[in-house]
Image (tube, grey):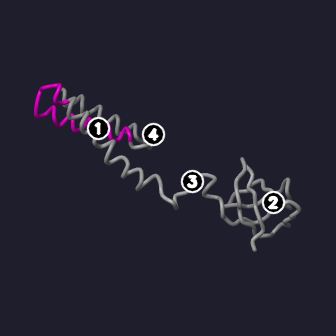
Amino acid sequence: MAALIWFVAGLALIAAEVLSGDFVLLMLGLGGLLGAGSALITDNVYIQVAVFAVASVGLLGVVRPALKKRFLSGPDHKTNADALIGAQAVVLSTVDIQSGQVKLGGDVWSARCFTEGQVLEPGTRVTVVEISGATAVVSAEP
């Protein structure tokens, strides 16, 4: 019975990892599965808890950092607005220092010029320099 409880708790933690994405619940879930394995071998609850604790701490300390480095970080892993910086766009309506629109990645974005005094006409190809809120700050391609 204890093995079943450990097993279900481990699977629940692993399933909950889908919501967090930080690999903590995954490591605890794997620790729970190892606790289930120890429950099959012994009825001693102290040993089961010790196996769970040692396995979870070990996994959190050794495996989790390696997984995070492999899947969640890296110099070329850009997300959200960072992924748009350096992207190419086309001016749809005149872009100046205050307003305008560009087509960026298939979507229409509000835009403004990076350089004061510059005016970009429709059809001009531009590069996204930064994202400021919901506005793409663009500069004409050289």
Q: Which label was assigned to residue 20?
A: 4
Residue identifier under label 3: 79
**Residue 101, image quadrant:** bottom right
Q: Position of residue 26 (x, y in %)?
A: 35, 41
User: Circle 4 sits in a helix, a strand or a loop, which is it?
Assistant: helix
**Residue 97, image quadrant:** bottom right
Badge 1 density bin: few <14, some 14–19, many ≥20, Cα 10 Å: many
Q: Position of residue 122 (x, y in %)?
A: 83, 66
- Relative to residue 5, is residue 22 depicted above or below? below
What is the CA distance from the residue labelled 2 to the residue labelled 1?
A: 52 Å
Q: From the image, which quarter does the N terminus lie in? A: top left
Query: Given the image, on which type of amino acid does mark 1 rest?
Result: Ser
Q: Which label was assigned to residue 117?
A: none
Q: Position of residue 130 (x, y in %)?
A: 70, 56
Q: From the image, which quarter does the C terminus lie in? A: bottom right
Q: Which label was assigned to residue 56?
A: 1
What residue is rendered at 64% in x and 58% in y?
84
Magenta residues (range) = 24-48
Query: Given the image, on which type of amino acid does mark 4 rest?
Result: Ser
What is the CA distance from the residue labelled 3 to the residue labelled 2?
A: 23 Å
Q: Nearer the viewer, mark 1 or mark 3?
A: 1
Dot 4 or dot 2: first in sequence order is: 4
What is the CA distance from the residue labelled 1 to the residue labelled 3?
A: 30 Å
Dot 3 or dot 4: first in sequence order is: 4
Q: Which label was assigned to residue 113?
A: 2
Q: Is 46 one of the magenta-colored residues? A: yes
Query: Given the image, on which type of amino acid does mark 2 rest?
Result: Cys
**17 on left or right of 77:** left
